[in-house]
Image (cartoon, grey):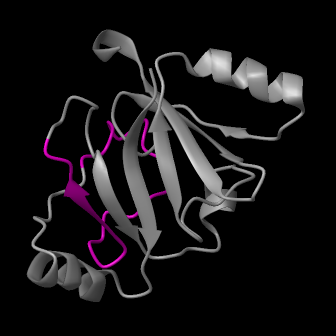
Amino acid sequence: MVTIHHVNLPANDVRASARFYSEIIGMSEGSWVFPPAEQVGHISSDTRKLTVFPATTMSQGENAGLHLIRPDPEFARKNQLDHNPSIGGHVALQVTDLDAVVQRLEAAGIPYSLTGTFAIPGMRHLYCYDPSMNLLEINEMVGAES
């Protein structure tokens, strides 16, 4: 089963965008939940650089919903990724078997960046481009929650 976990939108002014989604659209801003300190990657906890508008259900784990992030040209390098999820936006698809997706990407010769837990507790991610060069995040819950 594949579901949408989140949509990540770049925002040059995260606070102005957050006000728009709160005051105009009527969404409720939440607080980003980070993995344990030893697992967190290079991601800012500054709400001027990153925020979340949680989905109505947390059945997909922490931080599901709408993400607003200030583009960071160094994000990929700092996190040892080939893909930069802070630039241009992306949709995140949650799967139950990330290893099967990795096998299919490799068989098709599609490059990807695989991470452990670095931005969302209990979740590992990969980033790749679809044929139209849209950045995708594909993730799965790991551990007791899967």
Q: Is residue 55 magenta?
A: yes
> Could you say where residue 53 lies in the image, as x and y percent from the top left?
21, 60
The x and y percentages for residue 50 are: 34, 68
Q: Position of residue 35 (x, y in %)?
A: 33, 38
The correct choice, above or below, for 71 with respect to 108 in the image is below
| Chain part drawn in magenta | 33-56
Among the 4 quarters of the image, the one containing residue 7: bottom left
Q: Which SS does the magenta portion mostly show?
A: loop
- Spot occupied by residue 28 in the image (x, y as percentages of width and height): 10, 64
In this rendered view, identify the residue nearer to me: 105 or 63: 105
Question: Is residue 69 or residue 100 the one in the foreground?
Answer: 100
Q: Is residue 117 visible?
A: no
User: Which picture quadrant has residue 125?
Assistant: top right
Q: Is residue 51 magenta?
A: yes
Residue at point 30%, 71% (across, down): 46
Q: Nearer the viewer, residue 98 or 48?
A: 98
107 to the left or right of 63 = right
Q: Is residue 92 left or right of residue 131?
A: left
Confirm whether residue 59 shows in the render: yes
